[in-house]
Amino acid sequence: MIVLENVSLTYDSGTIFQKAAIKNVSLSIRKGESVSIVGKIGSGKSTLVQFFNGLIKPDSGKVFVGGEDLGSKETNLKSVRRKVGLVFQYPEEQFFAETVFDEVAFGPKNMGLSGKELKDAVWQSLSDMGFNPSDVANLSPFGLSGGEKRRIAIASIIAMNPEVLVLDEPTSGLDYTGRNLLIEYLKNENKKGRTLVFVTHNMDEALEVSRRVIAMKDGKKVFDGNSEDFFTSEELVYGIGLDVPFVVKVWKKLKKRFPELPFCRSSKELVDFLYGGPAR
Amino acid sequence: MKARFALGQYTYTNSLLHKLDPRVKILLVFSLVVFLFFVRTITGYLILFVFACSLVVLSKNSFSSVFRSLRPILILLLFTAVFQIFFTPGRLIFEWRFIKITAEGLRLAIYISIRLILLSFFTFILTSTTSGIELTDGFEALISPLKIFRFPAEEVSLMISISLRFVPVLFEEADRIMKAQMSRGAEFNKGSLVNRARSFLPLLLPLLLNALSRADRLAIAMESRGFVIGKKRTRYREMKLSRLDYVAIAITVSVFVFALVVKEIV
């Protein structure tokens, strides 16, 4: 679905501010996958995902989306952006419309939808994000809570019905419930078949959301593979300057006592196992 | 694209010019720029040009960055030069149909161009060797005598320093919001003028809202750190004239007087 070949990017090249942001990264994301991109702040995660819908172009290397070369002049970037929906960090800071409906409808309208089609798209995406559409459609998006705003912002991308949903730190600044709700909806979107790319520096979330993890350090890809392999290797995780998820730390201790304990991706799974069924 | 704002040309190269007192630098550049228009000879300008070039070398800046800083004024330069050439009355030296060029016009055009180029050379040297904080500190010190006329010197310089500080932030944010709206299918450079103007609403509105809320947060942060308007504050950097500053003043003044009184040699 998304393929990067030897992609490199340097900011402000030729000046003294020159800074290599991405160094020779190759990767491929298949349809229906869920991938977490992890790394410290400034490791190039956010820059990396902006290649995925052609917002930035690499200095060297190639980017393909659905087989189309984004560097080619014939490629329609608008249709690429419809395929790859990118949710920026703090997306609610880009709100401008008077009502939730208009806010969510901005994307699909730009894609040429109107009338019933438009309304259906908005309604569907709002209910996908856990809202009762008729309750919120006429409210001002600015009056909602932080978690609600975040979900509206994501709904406005989902309303374009992208095949790939890319989210840059979607949980930062959310409260506990808001975060949990969002993670559930995202996992659900992936289950329904939408490809999910999840950028985060929260290791517990990365483990919970994705089976595959890509780790970035100083603009280079340093790991790409199974998230279980990654997070159970302290050497790997600490080497990149990240922390082992809390769940994995507890799981490792428990594993010594209960050798039959399977790998757990979230505290919920851990508790479920220990209580022999879904916890209260 | 990262918006690197032209005002923030400050680059730390630890040269002698960086060590000068900002007040001295501001005053010298200011007077140079004003008195530039009193020099009447090409030789005088040549001397100033050599002086400006040696300052660039002394500031350890590359000449390419100086020329890059000239780029924004290029259109202004061409425009004024063309106007002077064609619309100054005087002794005709060239005529073709309605185009008339006079000796005085040509002379004026050359002078204006040299003046504008020198002007931006000197201001470049000032802004590339003086950080934003030093500039506003220097500016505040220079306008503080106006306080006896109840002029709010501290507030004005605070306003300047906050605006300078947030210009790059605004540019970066505009870039970010633009990209985010483009991800939602927005296009900013297509369609009729009205459509184009309307397409900027999803950019301008969030930009304004975020700026207002940032201003709010900044005010609270400043107050919670004990800032009170009009109250006397002490400084981390005490500005003090050193021997280097006196040397700089002496050299600049003498070069300048020389440029003013020198006779035309060509």
Image (cartoon, coloured by chain):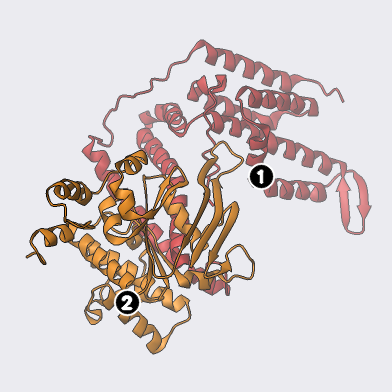
Chain colours: A orange, B red
Mark 1 = which residue? Answer: B71
Q: Work out whether B160 lies above or below B39.
A: below
Q: Is residue A195 left or right of residue A262?
A: right
Name which residue type carries label 1. Arg
Quarter of the image for the C terminus of chain A: give it. bottom left
Which residue corresponds to the image point at 63% horizontal and 15% vertical from the top-left? B251
Q: Chain of mark 1?
A: B
**Percent position of residue A193, x then y:** 36, 74
Q: Chain of mark 2?
A: A
- Can you see residue B150? no
Q: Residues within 10 Å of mark 2 (few under 14, many from 20)?
A: many
Disc number placed over residue A194 in the picture, else none = none
Q: Is residue B16 left or right of residue A149?
A: right
Q: Work out whether A239 lies above or below A59.
A: above
Q: Secondary structure at mark 2?
A: helix
Which residue corresponds to the image point at 50% horizontal and 58% vertical from the top-left? A51
**Percent position of residue A155, x then y:** 33, 72
Q: CA distance from mark 1 to mark 2?
A: 48 Å
Q: Work out whether A73 lies above or below A118.
A: above
Q: Nearer the viewer, residue A35 or B201?
A: A35
Mark 2 = which residue? Answer: A125
Name which residue type carries label 2. Ser
